């Protein structure tokens, strides 16, 4: 897993996110593309009608809603708690176990195909997410993420159509 | 008067015997007087020339200056080819260095994410208090189509990754109140884009730092040194990926510095040209410059006398009074000129010749001095502090200069004057051949009066104080470019809400804000910046909370909201927290917003500027841009009690425009006083009027010419017209003495007038060369006035006198003596 991640220079995939929130009568389903470069930024783009683009890097999150014509920037330097939460989201989406370990306790549910459960170590993260489950395929590509929130709400993200650019040895 | 003359002769003899001691004492007195200038405070604020007190024009000009650009220096940073991140980093570094430099009281960058969070915590739970009509606003937002749009936008936000962290905040705002509220705050700051704690232009290529230097902009020495340090700092900035970094500094300190530098250049140029012109004049008349040096001694005494009088009485002097007054008492050189011109035609040795010259001009000198000094004293009655100060300076200066002429000039010229005195050059008396015949003279005088009366109504008065500044067009253009780049507007119009307590002032201000908002909808106002948008008065907040009772909450929620929300896919309980908030506000359960809540928030500095309290009162300020003068009048009329509109245009129109009327009244009073004094001296009213006619013709002629040439009068040139009266009366007196005297063909009086008018033109006329608009207008007005008065005295007055003689066989005894 570690080797696979180290080889990955760039990754893109399609995703389908299903949000099961008590505030909503039905599940909120959105689709889009995720793309990230190693050591660079992660771009989370959602297709219309819920079109939006979130760009995450070490310093900030920039959120753009084309339909609303607004762009919002959240500077992590000013809010370390926010940094941790977004770092977690980013590390989960990148399946970056090295960076997840200080924030979450990792539990191995299944070896092949790999399945992990993460439980937050930090209170600022556990207030938002109670448990995260990551599912991988045989090639150790992230295929599914399930985020369970403290109030019972949960979100499932399924990834497919991975395009991975790896470093040649 | 004769006894005084005899006593003065004894003094002259004593001084002649103790010349060096007198000279040393004179130098000592001059140095002691001049040292007052260093100790006294010099005022540079134009507003200080206007009447003061609460609600006064002076306060208006001060507040307009403060909310404009007077003490604000805007720094516009551009780093060629840099990304927004690189620009923000460069800006952050620069701001930090500037703060550390100790040159600034404040260096404002943009609000950081933390600032937004803190502000959100203060404002968002109490956002309903900030809506002018919360019940109406909720009803409008519950309109099905609008609500459906808000809920769709909410769902888009709920799908985003960050919704995990912001779920609660999102569900608390189903009507999209927050983004509209935050957008209204952002609009107050112009078209600035907050980015990583910095303020960027819309295109993201420029970064703005709003700074307040430690010293006022009008401390031009500090401002110049500060701008120099900023220039050096700009040269040290790291270049961007595709070129140099550019740092532009615009605003009050830059204007003040450029203005002062321009003024210095003007002073040098006009002083040099004045000196050259005076040297040419003395050389043409006396064939030497020795008398120029001696004649300058009374002038020096005059300047010091005026300065000391103002500083002793007021403790401070306005720079403009000093500059203007110093030139003004250049009139003081007229008395030495009359005296020396007359002395040159006398016989005898030094002291004898000078004594005879003094005897010859004694009466006219006194009449001239008394009328001129009284003319300036009338200015002391003005309600404009600027005019009073000018009157005091000029009257004291002229008196000192006159005293020095009488006491010192005679013995000094006797000792150090020329051995051989030149007679009047032949071309000067020949001018007398051009004197107009009586009927023509009366015709010309009538034509001037009628022409001026017809033209004067079209004379414009430019009351805009900024037009008196020496701002260079390119500096102004650069400032405007920076303002446009960041969508900023200088606040030309302010509404001041004044009350005894902070809350009362805020309550009046809330009424003002509501009025201006309605005017904005009608297209009459824009860019409203009001403290009421984030801090309404407690009473206003309570009223707004009570107004929510008009809303049938159960019905609104069940029939209007939940139907649409369900249709949009939300559960019935999704927005419970929002409705709880509305209910809590209705029941006064949520704490009201107070000024203290904004401490340590990004709105603190705006709050400090817009809400001020002194021991006596509090003021809350709202700035806006009116759409034309009609809008200013309409808004001004509609304001609630306790609020006043300060508009730079209106200040010019309503306050400074009173100045011409004041001057007309004061000038009229001055002429009347002169006529009374001269009537008593001449024992003839007709003769007194005749002596004052040249100055009146000069003044009317000047106004007529300015009106015909469409040159507007301003604060400075209008004040300077008093000088035309002062000089013109002297010219009339001297020419009248000559034509009504025992030897009307000597031409001593008329050549004296010619020399005096040339010397005044050398002092004032050369101001036309100045780049400073105030000085230039002064040069034009006084140049025309003095030339016209001198011409009227030399060419018209003899004819008028002859015409009068033909009607009355005998001339007044007083004048003939």
Image: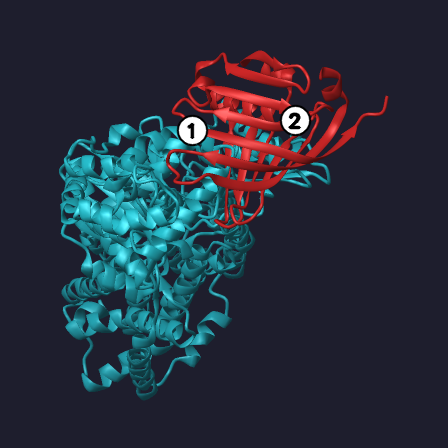
- Vertical comparison of B705 with B107: above or below: below
Q: Quadrant of residue B774?
A: bottom left
Q: What subunit carries mark 1?
A: A
Q: Which residue is mark 1?
A: A153
- In the rendered image, residue B263, in percent from the top left (x then y), is placed at 48, 47
- Vertical comparison of B508 with B463: above or below: above
Q: Which residue: 30% across, 68% down?
A: B695
Residue A142 is marked as: 2
- In the rendered image, residue B638, in percent from the top left (x then y), is placed at 19, 59
* B607, B337: nearer the viewer: B607
Q: Colour of chain B?
A: cyan
Q: Can the viewer see residue B101 in this picture?
A: no
Q: Which residue: 38% across, 77% down?
A: B795
Please indicate whether residue B638 sits to the left or right of residue B705 in the image: left
Q: Colour of chain A?
A: red
First of labels 2, 1 by sequence position: 2
Secondary structure at badge 2 equals strand
Q: Quadrant of residue B573?
A: top left
């Amino acid at each position: 897993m570690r080797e696979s991640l180290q080889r990955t220079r760039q990754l893109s995939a399609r995703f389908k996110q299903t949000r099961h929130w008590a505030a909503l009568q039905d599940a909120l389903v959105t689709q889009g593309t995720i793309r990230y470069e190693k050591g660079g930024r992660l771009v989370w783009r959602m297709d219309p009608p819920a079109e939006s683009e979130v760009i995450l890097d070490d310093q900030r999150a920039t959120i753009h809603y084309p339909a609303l014509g607004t762009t919002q920037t959240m500077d992590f330097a000013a809010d370390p708690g926010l940094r941790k939460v977004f770092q977690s989201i980013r590390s989960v989406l990148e399946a970056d176990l090295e960076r997840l370990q200080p924030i979450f306790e990792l539990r191995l549910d299944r070896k092949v195909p790999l399945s992990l459960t993460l439980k937050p170590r930090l209170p600022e993260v556990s207030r938002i997410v109670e448990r995260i489950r990551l599912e991988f395929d045989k090639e150790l590509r992230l295929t599914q993420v399930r985020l369970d929130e403290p109030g019972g709400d949960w979100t499932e993200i399924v990834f497919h159509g991975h395009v991975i650019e790896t470093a040649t040895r | 008067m004769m006894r005084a003359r005899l006593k003065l002769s004894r003094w002259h003899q004593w001084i002649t015997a103790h010349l060096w001691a007198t000279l040393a004492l004179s130098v000592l007195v001059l140095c002691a007087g001049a040292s007052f200038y260093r100790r006294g405070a010099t005022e540079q604020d134009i507003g200080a020339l206007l009447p003061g007190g609460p609600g006064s024009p002076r306060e208006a000009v001060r507040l307009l200056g403060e909310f404009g650009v007077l003490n604000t220096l805007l720094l516009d940073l551009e780093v060629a080819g840099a990304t927004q991140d690189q620009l923000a980093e460069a800006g952050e570094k620069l701001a930090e260095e500037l703060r550390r430099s100790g040159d600034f009281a404040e260096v404002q960058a943009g609000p950081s994410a933390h600032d937004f969070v803190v502000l959100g915590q203060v404002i968002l739970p109490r956002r309903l208090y900030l809506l002018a009509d919360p019940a109406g606003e909720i009803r409008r937002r519950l309109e099905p189509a609008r609500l459906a749009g808000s809920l769709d936008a909410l769902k888009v936000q709920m799908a985003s990754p960050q919704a995990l962290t912001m779920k609660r905040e999102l569900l608390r705002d189903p009507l999209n109140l927050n983004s509209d509220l935050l957008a209204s705050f952002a609009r107050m700051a112009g078209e600035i884009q907050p980015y990583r704690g910095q303020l960027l232009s819309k295109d993201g290529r420029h970064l703005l730092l709003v700074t307040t230097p430690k010293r006022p902009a009008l401390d031009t020495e500090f401002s110049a040194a500060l701008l120099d340090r900023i220039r050096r700092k700009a040269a040290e900035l790291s270049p961007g990926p595709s070129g140099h970094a550019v740092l532009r500094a615009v605003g009050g300190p830059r204007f003040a510095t450029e203005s002062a530098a321009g003024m210095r250049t003007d002073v040098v140029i006009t002083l040099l040209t004045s000196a050259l012109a005076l040297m040419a004049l003395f050389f043409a008349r006396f064939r030497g410059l020795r008398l120029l040096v001696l004649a300058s001694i009374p002038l020096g005494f005059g300047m010091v006398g005026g300065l000391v009088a103002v500083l002793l009485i007021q403790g401070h002097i306005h720079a403009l009074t000093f500059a203007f007054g110093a030139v003004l008492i250049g009139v003081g050189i007229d008395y030495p000129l009359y005296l020396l011109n007359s002395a040159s035609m006398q016989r005898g040795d030094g002291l004898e010749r000078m004594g005879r010259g003094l005897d010859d001009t004694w009466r006219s000198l006194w009449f001239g001095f008394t009328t001129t000094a009284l003319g300036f004293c009338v200015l002391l009655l003005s309600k404009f502090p600027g005019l009073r100060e000018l009157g005091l300076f000029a009257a004291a200066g002229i008196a000192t200069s006159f005293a020095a002429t009488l006491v010192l000039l005679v013995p000094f010229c006797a000792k150090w004057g020329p051995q051989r005195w030149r007679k009047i050059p032949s071309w000067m008396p020949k001018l007398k051949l051009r004197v107009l015949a009586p009927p023509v003279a009366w015709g010309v005088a009538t034509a001037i009066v009628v022409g001026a009366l017809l033209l004067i109504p079209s004379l414009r008065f430019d009351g805009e104080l900024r037009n008196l500044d020496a701002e260079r067009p390119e500096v102004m253009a650069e400032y405007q470019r920076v303002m446009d780049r960041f969508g900023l507007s200088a606040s030309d119009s302010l509404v001041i809400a004044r009350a005894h307590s902070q809350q009362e002032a805020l309550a009046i201000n809330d009424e003002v804000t509501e009025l201006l908002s309605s005017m904005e909808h009608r297209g009459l106002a824009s860019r409203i910046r009001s403290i009421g948008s984030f801090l309404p008065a407690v009473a206003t907040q309570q009223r707004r909370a009570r107004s929510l009772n008009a809303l049938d909450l159960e019905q609104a929620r069940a029939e209007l909201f939940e139907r649409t929300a369900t249709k949009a896919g939300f559960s019935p309980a999704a927005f419970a927290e929002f409705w709880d908030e509305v209910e809590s506000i209705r029941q006064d359960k949520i704490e009201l917003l107070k000024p203290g809540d904004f401490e340590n928030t990004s709105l603190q500095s705006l709050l400090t500027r817009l809400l001020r309290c002194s021991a006596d009162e509090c003021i809350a300020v709202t700035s806006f841009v009116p759409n034309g003068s009609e809008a200013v009048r309409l808004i001004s009329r509609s304001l609630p009690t306790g609020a006043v509109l300060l508009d730079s245009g209106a200040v010019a129109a309503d306050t400074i425009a009173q100045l011409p009327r004041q001057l007309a009244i004061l000038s009229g009073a001055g002429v009347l006083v002169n006529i009374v004094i001269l009537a008593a001296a001449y024992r003839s009213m007709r003769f007194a009027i005749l002596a004052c006619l040249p100055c009146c013709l000069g003044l009317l002629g000047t106004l007529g010419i300015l009106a015909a040439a469409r040159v507007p009068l301003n604060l400075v040139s209008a004040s300077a017209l008093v000088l035309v009266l002062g000089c013109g009366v002297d010219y009339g007196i001297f020419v009248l003495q000559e034509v009504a005297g025992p030897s009307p063909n000597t031409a001593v009086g008329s050549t004296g007038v010619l020399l005096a008018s040339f010397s005044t033109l050398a002092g004032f006329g050369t101001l036309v060369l100045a780049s400073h608009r105030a000085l230039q207008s002064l040069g034009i007005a006084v140049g025309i006035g003095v030339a016209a008065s001198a011409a009227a005295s030399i060419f018209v007055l003899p004819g008028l006198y002859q015409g009068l003689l033909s009607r009355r066989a005998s001339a007044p005894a007083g004048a003939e003596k």
